[in-house]
Image (tube, rainbow, N blue to C red):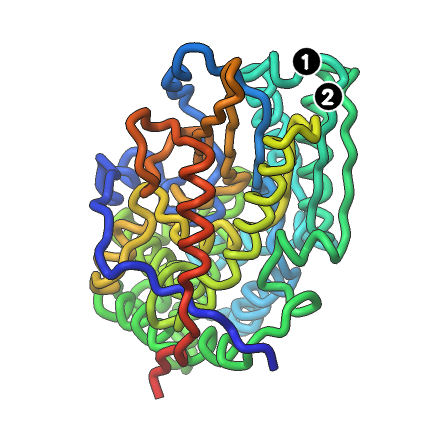
Amino acid sequence: MKKFFLLLLATGMLLPIHAQSLREDIAKDKQCSAGYYKLYTFDGTQETPAPAGYRPFYVSHYGRHGSRYMIDEEKYTELVDHLAPADSLGILSPLGKSVLERLRTIAADGKFRAGELSAVGARQHREIGSRLYNRYPELFAGDGEIDARSTMRVRCVLSMQSFCEALKENNPKLDITQSSSLRNSYWLEFFNKDTHDISPDLYKYWKKGLYVREKKDMLYKHVDIDGMYDQFFTSVPKVNKEKKLSFLVKLYDIGNNQKGVESDINFYDIFSNEDLYWFTVSDSYNQYSERGPNPQAGGINMYYSKLLLEDILNRAQDAVDGNGRKADLRFGHDIDLMALIPMMQINDWYMTGLDPETTGEKWQISKLTPMAANLQFVFYKNPQNEVLLKVMHNEKEVKLPVPTTQAPYYKWSDFKDFYEKHMAALPEPVTPTFYE
Protein backbone atom coordinates (compact mmCIF):
# COMPACT_ATOMS: atom_id res chain seq x y z
CA MET A 1 0.00 0.00 0.00
CA LYS A 2 1.41 3.35 -1.03
CA LYS A 3 2.31 5.55 1.90
CA PHE A 4 0.91 9.03 1.98
CA PHE A 5 2.80 12.20 2.50
CA LEU A 6 1.49 14.49 5.20
CA LEU A 7 0.99 18.15 4.74
CA LEU A 8 1.10 19.92 8.07
CA LEU A 9 1.10 23.64 7.46
CA ALA A 10 2.14 26.20 10.05
CA THR A 11 0.07 26.01 13.19
CA GLY A 12 -0.90 29.66 12.95
CA MET A 13 -3.95 30.78 11.03
CA LEU A 14 -5.06 33.74 9.03
CA LEU A 15 -7.74 35.84 10.63
CA PRO A 16 -11.19 35.30 9.13
CA ILE A 17 -12.34 37.92 6.66
CA HIS A 18 -16.06 37.14 6.59
CA ALA A 19 -17.61 40.50 7.42
CA GLN A 20 -21.00 39.15 8.41
CA SER A 21 -21.81 36.32 10.79
CA LEU A 22 -23.42 33.11 9.63
CA ARG A 23 -26.51 33.81 11.74
CA GLU A 24 -26.92 37.16 9.99
CA ASP A 25 -26.42 35.52 6.60
CA ILE A 26 -29.11 32.93 7.28
CA ALA A 27 -31.53 35.55 8.61
CA LYS A 28 -31.18 37.46 5.32
CA ASP A 29 -31.13 34.43 3.00
CA LYS A 30 -31.82 30.86 4.10
CA GLN A 31 -29.83 29.63 1.10
CA CYS A 32 -26.77 30.50 3.18
CA SER A 33 -27.57 27.37 5.19
CA ALA A 34 -27.33 25.18 2.07
CA GLY A 35 -23.63 24.33 2.46
CA TYR A 36 -22.14 22.78 -0.66
CA TYR A 37 -25.61 22.76 -2.27
CA LYS A 38 -25.71 26.56 -2.26
CA LEU A 39 -26.36 28.15 -5.64
CA TYR A 40 -23.38 29.92 -7.19
CA THR A 41 -23.67 33.71 -7.02
CA PHE A 42 -21.66 36.47 -8.65
CA ASP A 43 -21.85 39.97 -7.23
CA GLY A 44 -19.89 41.81 -9.90
CA THR A 45 -16.93 42.61 -7.66
CA GLN A 46 -14.52 45.11 -9.20
CA GLU A 47 -11.06 43.86 -10.13
CA THR A 48 -7.74 45.53 -9.39
CA PRO A 49 -6.20 46.80 -12.67
CA ALA A 50 -3.02 45.05 -13.73
CA PRO A 51 0.23 47.03 -13.40
CA ALA A 52 1.02 49.27 -16.36
CA GLY A 53 2.15 47.42 -19.46
CA TYR A 54 0.90 43.97 -18.42
CA ARG A 55 -1.64 42.17 -20.60
CA PRO A 56 -3.39 38.82 -19.95
CA PHE A 57 -2.14 35.88 -22.03
CA TYR A 58 -3.16 32.67 -20.23
CA VAL A 59 -5.67 31.40 -17.69
CA SER A 60 -5.72 28.19 -15.68
CA HIS A 61 -9.10 27.18 -14.27
CA TYR A 62 -10.52 24.51 -11.96
CA GLY A 63 -14.30 24.40 -11.63
CA ARG A 64 -16.59 22.27 -9.57
CA HIS A 65 -19.55 20.86 -11.52
CA GLY A 66 -22.75 22.90 -11.35
CA SER A 67 -25.92 22.21 -9.39
CA ARG A 68 -27.06 18.61 -9.59
CA TYR A 69 -29.57 16.09 -8.33
CA MET A 70 -28.69 14.11 -5.20
CA ILE A 71 -25.77 11.74 -5.68
CA ASP A 72 -27.72 8.57 -4.85
CA GLU A 73 -31.37 7.87 -5.60
CA GLU A 74 -31.52 6.21 -2.19
CA LYS A 75 -31.20 9.67 -0.64
CA TYR A 76 -34.70 10.35 -1.99
CA THR A 77 -36.34 7.02 -1.30
CA GLU A 78 -34.98 6.33 2.21
CA LEU A 79 -36.77 9.35 3.68
CA VAL A 80 -40.05 8.35 2.04
CA ASP A 81 -39.56 4.80 3.30
CA HIS A 82 -38.92 6.11 6.80
CA LEU A 83 -42.28 7.90 7.05
CA ALA A 84 -44.49 5.72 4.84
CA PRO A 85 -45.07 2.93 7.42
CA ALA A 86 -46.31 5.48 9.97
CA ASP A 87 -48.64 6.88 7.33
CA SER A 88 -50.06 3.39 6.72
CA LEU A 89 -50.64 3.05 10.46
CA GLY A 90 -52.41 6.41 10.58
CA ILE A 91 -49.98 7.94 13.09
CA LEU A 92 -48.52 10.76 11.01
CA SER A 93 -49.43 14.25 12.19
CA PRO A 94 -50.66 16.80 9.62
CA LEU A 95 -47.09 18.14 9.50
CA GLY A 96 -45.75 14.60 9.01
CA LYS A 97 -48.20 14.03 6.15
CA SER A 98 -47.09 17.30 4.57
CA VAL A 99 -43.42 16.35 4.83
CA LEU A 100 -44.12 12.91 3.33
CA GLU A 101 -46.04 14.45 0.44
CA ARG A 102 -43.18 16.84 -0.27
CA LEU A 103 -40.65 14.02 -0.11
CA ARG A 104 -42.66 11.91 -2.54
CA THR A 105 -42.78 14.81 -5.00
CA ILE A 106 -39.03 15.32 -4.65
CA ALA A 107 -38.36 11.58 -5.08
CA ALA A 108 -40.52 11.40 -8.22
CA ASP A 109 -38.62 14.32 -9.75
CA GLY A 110 -35.26 12.75 -8.87
CA LYS A 111 -36.05 9.26 -10.15
CA PHE A 112 -33.30 7.98 -12.49
CA ARG A 113 -31.47 11.30 -12.12
CA ALA A 114 -28.93 10.52 -9.39
CA GLY A 115 -25.97 12.88 -9.74
CA GLU A 116 -27.32 14.41 -12.95
CA LEU A 117 -26.41 18.00 -13.80
CA SER A 118 -29.49 20.19 -13.60
CA ALA A 119 -30.45 23.00 -15.96
CA VAL A 120 -29.37 25.38 -13.20
CA GLY A 121 -25.94 23.73 -13.12
CA ALA A 122 -25.46 24.01 -16.87
CA ARG A 123 -26.48 27.66 -16.75
CA GLN A 124 -24.00 28.38 -13.97
CA HIS A 125 -21.10 27.22 -16.11
CA ARG A 126 -22.29 29.02 -19.23
CA GLU A 127 -22.41 32.23 -17.24
CA ILE A 128 -18.97 31.72 -15.65
CA GLY A 129 -17.47 30.90 -19.05
CA SER A 130 -19.08 33.93 -20.64
CA ARG A 131 -17.86 36.23 -17.87
CA LEU A 132 -14.34 34.85 -18.22
CA TYR A 133 -14.39 35.64 -21.93
CA ASN A 134 -15.76 39.14 -21.43
CA ARG A 135 -13.27 39.84 -18.65
CA TYR A 136 -10.30 39.00 -20.91
CA PRO A 137 -11.48 39.33 -24.53
CA GLU A 138 -7.97 39.89 -25.90
CA LEU A 139 -6.81 36.64 -24.32
CA PHE A 140 -9.54 34.73 -26.17
CA ALA A 141 -9.19 36.56 -29.49
CA GLY A 142 -8.46 34.72 -32.73
CA ASP A 143 -8.12 30.95 -33.04
CA GLY A 144 -6.36 30.37 -29.73
CA GLU A 145 -5.85 26.84 -28.39
CA ILE A 146 -7.74 25.79 -25.25
CA ASP A 147 -7.50 22.42 -23.51
CA ALA A 148 -10.51 21.41 -21.41
CA ARG A 149 -10.46 18.29 -19.24
CA SER A 150 -12.95 16.73 -16.87
CA THR A 151 -13.33 13.71 -14.66
CA MET A 152 -15.52 10.89 -15.92
CA ARG A 153 -18.59 11.98 -13.96
CA VAL A 154 -21.27 13.00 -16.46
CA ARG A 155 -22.15 16.12 -14.45
CA CYS A 156 -18.54 17.28 -14.85
CA VAL A 157 -18.48 16.50 -18.57
CA LEU A 158 -21.69 18.49 -19.14
CA SER A 159 -20.38 21.36 -16.98
CA MET A 160 -17.27 21.44 -19.18
CA GLN A 161 -19.38 21.44 -22.34
CA SER A 162 -21.56 24.29 -21.08
CA PHE A 163 -18.51 26.37 -20.16
CA CYS A 164 -16.82 25.74 -23.51
CA GLU A 165 -20.02 26.45 -25.45
CA ALA A 166 -20.11 29.89 -23.85
CA LEU A 167 -16.57 30.58 -25.03
CA LYS A 168 -17.38 29.39 -28.56
CA GLU A 169 -20.54 31.49 -28.66
CA ASN A 170 -18.37 34.53 -28.03
CA ASN A 171 -15.67 33.46 -30.46
CA PRO A 172 -16.42 30.53 -32.84
CA LYS A 173 -12.77 30.51 -33.99
CA LEU A 174 -11.44 29.20 -30.69
CA ASP A 175 -9.73 25.80 -30.98
CA ILE A 176 -11.10 23.95 -27.94
CA THR A 177 -10.20 20.33 -27.20
CA GLN A 178 -12.39 18.56 -24.64
CA SER A 179 -11.63 15.26 -22.94
CA SER A 180 -12.98 13.10 -20.12
CA SER A 181 -10.92 10.17 -18.93
CA LEU A 182 -9.62 8.21 -15.97
CA ARG A 183 -6.22 9.71 -16.72
CA ASN A 184 -7.71 13.15 -16.16
CA SER A 185 -9.12 11.92 -12.85
CA TYR A 186 -5.60 11.18 -11.61
CA TRP A 187 -5.02 14.92 -11.38
CA LEU A 188 -8.53 16.29 -11.06
CA GLU A 189 -10.26 13.83 -8.71
CA PHE A 190 -7.57 12.79 -6.29
CA PHE A 191 -9.89 10.88 -3.94
CA ASN A 192 -10.66 8.43 -6.77
CA LYS A 193 -9.83 4.88 -5.66
CA ASP A 194 -9.44 3.81 -9.31
CA THR A 195 -6.43 6.08 -9.78
CA HIS A 196 -4.94 6.26 -6.27
CA ASP A 197 -3.92 3.67 -3.71
CA ILE A 198 -5.95 5.10 -0.84
CA SER A 199 -5.00 4.17 2.70
CA PRO A 200 -7.55 2.12 4.68
CA ASP A 201 -7.02 4.66 7.47
CA LEU A 202 -8.84 7.26 5.39
CA TYR A 203 -11.95 5.12 5.01
CA LYS A 204 -11.87 4.31 8.70
CA TYR A 205 -11.47 8.02 9.51
CA TRP A 206 -14.56 8.95 7.49
CA LYS A 207 -16.59 6.55 9.65
CA LYS A 208 -14.89 6.70 13.03
CA GLY A 209 -12.84 9.89 13.09
CA LEU A 210 -13.18 11.95 16.26
CA TYR A 211 -14.95 14.64 14.25
CA VAL A 212 -17.85 12.23 13.53
CA ARG A 213 -18.72 12.24 17.21
CA GLU A 214 -18.03 15.97 17.58
CA LYS A 215 -20.37 17.02 14.77
CA LYS A 216 -23.21 14.92 16.24
CA ASP A 217 -22.58 16.13 19.79
CA MET A 218 -22.85 19.69 18.50
CA LEU A 219 -26.39 19.05 17.27
CA TYR A 220 -27.43 17.07 20.34
CA LYS A 221 -26.30 20.02 22.44
CA HIS A 222 -27.95 22.86 20.53
CA VAL A 223 -30.97 21.37 18.72
CA ASP A 224 -34.11 19.78 20.20
CA ILE A 225 -33.78 16.58 18.18
CA ASP A 226 -36.66 14.79 19.94
CA GLY A 227 -39.02 17.73 19.61
CA MET A 228 -38.21 18.32 15.95
CA TYR A 229 -38.63 14.66 15.01
CA ASP A 230 -41.59 13.78 17.23
CA GLN A 231 -43.78 16.53 15.72
CA PHE A 232 -44.19 14.38 12.61
CA PHE A 233 -46.27 11.83 14.52
CA THR A 234 -49.43 11.61 16.60
CA SER A 235 -48.01 8.49 18.23
CA VAL A 236 -44.19 8.53 18.15
CA PRO A 237 -42.64 5.20 17.07
CA LYS A 238 -39.77 3.75 19.05
CA VAL A 239 -36.73 5.28 17.35
CA ASN A 240 -33.46 6.02 19.11
CA LYS A 241 -32.06 9.54 19.13
CA GLU A 242 -29.26 8.76 16.69
CA LYS A 243 -31.74 7.56 14.06
CA LYS A 244 -33.87 10.64 14.66
CA LEU A 245 -30.82 12.83 14.08
CA SER A 246 -29.90 10.88 10.95
CA PHE A 247 -33.37 11.46 9.48
CA LEU A 248 -33.24 15.20 10.26
CA VAL A 249 -29.75 15.61 8.78
CA LYS A 250 -30.92 13.91 5.56
CA LEU A 251 -34.04 16.08 5.49
CA TYR A 252 -31.88 19.18 5.92
CA ASP A 253 -29.63 17.92 3.11
CA ILE A 254 -32.34 17.15 0.56
CA GLY A 255 -34.11 20.44 1.28
CA ASN A 256 -30.90 22.36 0.66
CA ASN A 257 -30.62 20.95 -2.85
CA GLN A 258 -34.07 21.87 -4.14
CA LYS A 259 -33.27 25.31 -5.53
CA GLY A 260 -30.48 23.72 -7.54
CA VAL A 261 -33.02 21.58 -9.43
CA GLU A 262 -35.50 24.44 -9.91
CA SER A 263 -37.90 23.24 -7.21
CA ASP A 264 -39.74 25.54 -4.80
CA ILE A 265 -40.14 22.79 -2.20
CA ASN A 266 -38.37 23.41 1.10
CA PHE A 267 -38.49 22.38 4.75
CA TYR A 268 -37.95 25.76 6.35
CA ASP A 269 -41.13 25.23 8.37
CA ILE A 270 -39.30 22.40 10.13
CA PHE A 271 -36.02 24.20 10.81
CA SER A 272 -35.94 27.53 12.61
CA ASN A 273 -33.14 29.96 11.72
CA GLU A 274 -31.30 28.83 14.84
CA ASP A 275 -31.73 25.19 13.86
CA LEU A 276 -30.43 26.01 10.39
CA TYR A 277 -27.45 27.74 11.96
CA TRP A 278 -26.42 24.68 13.96
CA PHE A 279 -27.04 22.19 11.15
CA THR A 280 -24.92 24.42 8.92
CA VAL A 281 -22.12 24.73 11.47
CA SER A 282 -22.12 20.96 11.98
CA ASP A 283 -22.06 20.36 8.22
CA SER A 284 -19.20 22.83 7.65
CA TYR A 285 -17.20 21.23 10.45
CA ASN A 286 -17.85 17.85 8.84
CA GLN A 287 -16.44 19.02 5.49
CA TYR A 288 -13.53 20.79 7.19
CA SER A 289 -12.68 17.48 8.83
CA GLU A 290 -13.36 15.05 5.99
CA ARG A 291 -11.71 16.97 3.15
CA GLY A 292 -10.16 20.08 4.64
CA PRO A 293 -7.27 20.97 6.95
CA ASN A 294 -8.45 19.43 10.23
CA PRO A 295 -5.26 17.95 11.75
CA GLN A 296 -7.39 14.97 12.85
CA ALA A 297 -7.18 13.72 9.24
CA GLY A 298 -3.45 13.17 9.58
CA GLY A 299 -2.68 15.31 6.52
CA ILE A 300 -4.05 12.87 3.92
CA ASN A 301 -6.39 15.48 2.41
CA MET A 302 -3.60 18.01 2.08
CA TYR A 303 -1.33 15.49 0.43
CA TYR A 304 -3.73 14.69 -2.38
CA SER A 305 -4.16 18.35 -3.27
CA LYS A 306 -0.48 18.47 -4.17
CA LEU A 307 -1.24 16.49 -7.32
CA LEU A 308 -3.63 19.13 -8.62
CA LEU A 309 -1.28 22.00 -7.81
CA GLU A 310 1.56 20.21 -9.60
CA ASP A 311 -0.62 19.94 -12.71
CA ILE A 312 -1.49 23.64 -12.48
CA LEU A 313 2.16 24.67 -12.10
CA ASN A 314 3.49 22.41 -14.86
CA ARG A 315 0.92 23.42 -17.45
CA ALA A 316 1.29 27.07 -16.57
CA GLN A 317 5.04 26.86 -17.06
CA ASP A 318 4.44 25.39 -20.52
CA ALA A 319 2.26 28.40 -21.35
CA VAL A 320 4.85 30.82 -19.98
CA ASP A 321 7.48 29.07 -22.09
CA GLY A 322 5.39 29.80 -25.17
CA ASN A 323 3.37 26.71 -26.09
CA GLY A 324 0.65 29.04 -27.39
CA ARG A 325 -2.16 27.67 -25.29
CA LYS A 326 -4.60 30.30 -24.07
CA ALA A 327 -6.27 28.32 -21.32
CA ASP A 328 -6.25 25.06 -19.39
CA LEU A 329 -9.75 24.33 -18.10
CA ARG A 330 -10.44 21.61 -15.52
CA PHE A 331 -13.81 20.36 -14.28
CA GLY A 332 -14.11 18.25 -11.17
CA HIS A 333 -15.48 18.25 -7.66
CA ASP A 334 -15.85 20.28 -4.49
CA ILE A 335 -13.83 17.87 -2.36
CA ASP A 336 -10.69 18.65 -4.37
CA LEU A 337 -11.09 22.39 -3.91
CA MET A 338 -11.78 21.84 -0.19
CA ALA A 339 -8.26 20.43 0.09
CA LEU A 340 -6.40 22.57 -2.46
CA ILE A 341 -7.55 26.00 -1.28
CA PRO A 342 -6.50 25.61 2.37
CA MET A 343 -3.29 23.83 1.33
CA MET A 344 -2.41 26.93 -0.69
CA GLN A 345 -3.30 29.09 2.33
CA ILE A 346 -5.66 31.19 0.25
CA ASN A 347 -7.32 33.96 2.28
CA ASP A 348 -8.44 32.58 5.65
CA TRP A 349 -9.30 29.04 4.55
CA TYR A 350 -6.39 27.39 6.32
CA MET A 351 -7.27 27.36 10.02
CA THR A 352 -6.49 25.03 12.89
CA GLY A 353 -6.57 25.19 16.66
CA LEU A 354 -10.20 26.27 16.95
CA ASP A 355 -12.95 24.33 18.69
CA PRO A 356 -15.46 22.54 16.42
CA GLU A 357 -18.23 25.11 16.88
CA THR A 358 -15.99 28.08 16.06
CA THR A 359 -14.47 26.26 13.10
CA GLY A 360 -17.88 25.43 11.68
CA GLU A 361 -18.94 29.06 12.00
CA LYS A 362 -15.87 30.44 10.25
CA TRP A 363 -15.13 27.69 7.68
CA GLN A 364 -18.40 28.26 5.81
CA ILE A 365 -18.64 25.64 3.12
CA SER A 366 -21.29 27.63 1.24
CA LYS A 367 -18.66 30.32 0.62
CA LEU A 368 -15.78 27.94 -0.06
CA THR A 369 -17.38 25.46 -2.47
CA PRO A 370 -20.92 26.29 -3.54
CA MET A 371 -22.12 24.60 -6.71
CA ALA A 372 -19.86 25.59 -9.65
CA ALA A 373 -17.16 26.88 -7.26
CA ASN A 374 -13.96 27.71 -9.09
CA LEU A 375 -10.34 28.75 -8.81
CA GLN A 376 -8.77 30.79 -11.62
CA PHE A 377 -5.11 31.66 -12.18
CA VAL A 378 -4.81 34.57 -14.59
CA PHE A 379 -1.40 35.26 -16.14
CA TYR A 380 -0.11 38.60 -17.48
CA LYS A 381 3.11 39.66 -19.17
CA ASN A 382 4.69 42.92 -20.27
CA PRO A 383 6.78 43.69 -23.39
CA GLN A 384 9.87 42.47 -21.52
CA ASN A 385 8.15 39.09 -21.02
CA GLU A 386 8.03 39.51 -17.27
CA VAL A 387 5.13 37.44 -15.95
CA LEU A 388 2.68 38.20 -13.18
CA LEU A 389 -0.42 36.31 -12.10
CA LYS A 390 -3.35 36.69 -9.78
CA VAL A 391 -5.65 34.07 -8.32
CA MET A 392 -9.41 34.35 -8.12
CA HIS A 393 -11.68 32.21 -5.96
CA ASN A 394 -15.26 32.22 -7.17
CA GLU A 395 -14.31 35.17 -9.40
CA LYS A 396 -12.98 37.27 -6.51
CA GLU A 397 -9.33 38.26 -6.06
CA VAL A 398 -7.58 36.52 -3.19
CA LYS A 399 -4.63 37.00 -0.87
CA LEU A 400 -1.77 34.48 -0.98
CA PRO A 401 1.18 33.88 1.39
CA VAL A 402 3.59 34.64 -1.48
CA PRO A 403 5.63 37.85 -0.96
CA THR A 404 4.60 40.69 -3.28
CA THR A 405 4.57 44.47 -3.53
CA GLN A 406 1.74 44.44 -6.09
CA ALA A 407 -1.09 42.47 -4.45
CA PRO A 408 -3.23 40.86 -5.72
CA TYR A 409 -0.59 40.34 -8.42
CA TYR A 410 2.40 38.06 -7.84
CA LYS A 411 5.54 37.40 -9.85
CA TRP A 412 5.23 34.01 -11.51
CA SER A 413 8.79 33.12 -10.51
CA ASP A 414 8.04 33.91 -6.85
CA PHE A 415 4.71 32.08 -6.94
CA LYS A 416 6.18 28.96 -8.52
CA ASP A 417 9.23 28.94 -6.25
CA PHE A 418 7.09 29.37 -3.12
CA TYR A 419 4.71 26.53 -3.88
CA GLU A 420 7.37 24.14 -5.18
CA LYS A 421 9.24 24.55 -1.89
CA HIS A 422 5.97 24.33 0.01
CA MET A 423 5.17 20.96 -1.56
CA ALA A 424 8.75 19.66 -1.31
CA ALA A 425 8.64 20.27 2.45
CA LEU A 426 5.63 18.05 3.03
CA PRO A 427 6.37 15.57 5.82
CA GLU A 428 5.14 12.01 6.12
CA PRO A 429 1.58 11.40 7.37
CA VAL A 430 0.44 10.51 10.82
CA THR A 431 -2.46 8.25 11.74
CA PRO A 432 -5.84 10.04 11.81
CA THR A 433 -7.52 10.66 15.16
CA PHE A 434 -10.30 8.19 15.92
CA TYR A 435 -12.90 8.28 18.68
CA GLU A 436 -12.27 4.72 19.80
Badge 1 marks a residue whose secondary structure is loop
Q: In which quarter of the image is the C terminus?
A: bottom left
Question: Which label was assigned to residue 24?
Answer: none
> Could you say which is closer to the camera, residue 157 or residue 174?
174
C-alpha separation, residue under disc 1 versus residue under disc 2: 7 Å
Q: Quadrant of the N terminus?
A: bottom right
Horizontal and vertical percent for residue 135?
53, 17
Horizontal and vertical percent for residue 361?
26, 52
Label 1 close to label 2 by CB (< 8 Å)? yes
> Could you say which is closer to the camera, residue 320 or residue 248?
320
Question: Which label was assigned to residue 144?
Answer: 2
Which amino acid type is marked by label 1?
Answer: Ala
Tell me what residue is drawn at x 68 percent, y 65 percent.
195
**Would you call the spot at circle 2 few (<14 residues within 10 Å), some (14-19), or many (20 or more)?**
some
Q: Can residue 105 be seen in this view?
A: no
Q: Which of the 4 quarters of the picture holds residue 85?
A: bottom right
Tell me what residue is drawn at x 54 percent, y 19 percent.
56
Please name the residue that numbered disc 1 is placed on: 141
Tell me what residue is drawn at x 70 percent, y 26 percent.
324
